[in-house]
Image (spheres, rainbow, N blue to C red):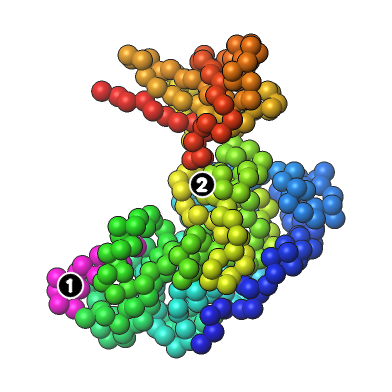
Amino acid sequence: MTAFNHQIETRDPAAREAELFAALPAVLDAARELPAWAERLKDIDSEAVRDRAALARLPVLRKSDLPALHAASLPFGGLLAPPSPIYSRLFASPGPIFEPEVNGRDAWRSARALHAAGFRAGEIVLNTFSYHLTPGGFIFDSGANALDCPVIPAGPGNTDAQLQLIEAYRPAGYTGTPDFLKILLDTARDKGADISSIKKAVVSGAAFPPSLQKEIAERGVEAYQAYATAELGVVAFETPAREGLVVNEGLIVEIVRPGTGDPVPDGEIGEVLVTALDPLHPIIRLALGDLSAILPGASPCGRTNQRIRGWLGRADQTTKIKGMFVRPEQIAEIGRAHPGLGKLRLVVTRDGEADQMMLLAESPISNSADAKALITALAATLHEITKVRGTAEIVGVGELPNDGKVIADERIYT
């Protein structure tokens, strides 16, 4: 029984990086054949995008913008080819966001995640992700099939019927949310059903806090997390090392400062951006709206790709202040207007019945005579860009928390 789904998971990191960026120009050229990408990439020389610094200069596509783009040019907003035989299934996620499944084995890149969790050929999988309109069920169904694992397409809910299926088919593995796995375990215990055949699980779609991880493990199920989206399938997955999530092959993951496309140093929390190297389904710098961070080094499990810390919250911190929406992009614009600053953080509070906001800015001149002038200038720029008045304060470099927050809403309403 091999530890890895494919030898590419253990290749030299420098070789992987070179291969990813050698393939990227052709993907950019394929994307340029589609009207929306043609407009976004019109000033880009594909052959010049050969490293991460060049990639970081390409425009960001925000997942939050997809519903409007799709509505303006149904069904895919000009970002994908119209429905045709290259697609096997067509989906609609909340938004609505329309997504196709490209023909092919393991179309959603989930086989590696399942293999890392111990799923092997011939083992039956109970798949409780939804098969209704959204791709969730098919993301893990296709990966299990690629591993030659028969799948019970159960979907969520209908717990009693699922217990009967488990007792009849004796699946070895579970895929679904961690919450529903706990429901199955609790209901089986209460009703005396035997679902002890389930020894492993890949969970996604909901938080999996340490307390729930511990409880499920104590009840005999080794559960591993997968970070997946409807646009990309599995982006990263947990391994037996239990040290972060390993980025999937064929993807380029960047962590950027929220509201920008600017990469942050490894270890700093920021927004997840993903580029998928599939000419039939090109995705270039899609900002998922989730926070994470790059972990240094390689996983002890032997896989050599990048690792991320997993889901650490939402990057979309848009907040209404004094009746105006203030967005992370605006805070980033303030930073660009004052070069030399470190991290910025807008803190929103209440004073009596009024909203108050203070912009905290890291700067090496925090204790110098020039700080007062910078504070005045920052407050003026804050008002100019957000149209809301607030104050500013300078702090030392490295003093702001590494939590990915650009806007911290600390208002308490009584």
Could you tell me which residue is drawn at 76 percent across and 60 percent down? Answer: 21
* Relative image position of residue 247 (x, y in whole percent): 58, 62
Secondary structure mostly taken by the magenta-highlighted segment of the chain: helix
**Magenta stretch?**
178-193
* Relative image position of residue 323 (x, y in whole percent): 45, 20
Considering depth in this image, is 139 or 121 the residue closer to the camera? 121
Relative to residue 276, is residue 2 depicted above or below? below
Q: Distance between the residues labelled 2 and 1?
A: 36 Å
* Relative image position of residue 191 (x, y in whole percent): 14, 74
Would residue 199 be found to the left or right of residue 86 on screen? left
* Relative image position of residue 329 (x, y in whole percent): 59, 32
Q: Which mark is drawn over residue 291? A: 2
Could you tell me which residue is drawn at 59 percent across and 64 percent down? Answer: 298
Considering depth in this image, is 79 or 1 the residue closer to the camera? 1
**SS for callout 1:** helix
Could you tell me which residue is drawn at 26 percent across and 71 percent down? Answer: 219
Is 189 part of what is drawn in magenta?
Answer: yes
Crowding near the residue tagged with mark 1, few <14, some 14–19, many ≥20 C-alpha atoms within 10 Å: few
Residue bearing mark 1: 189
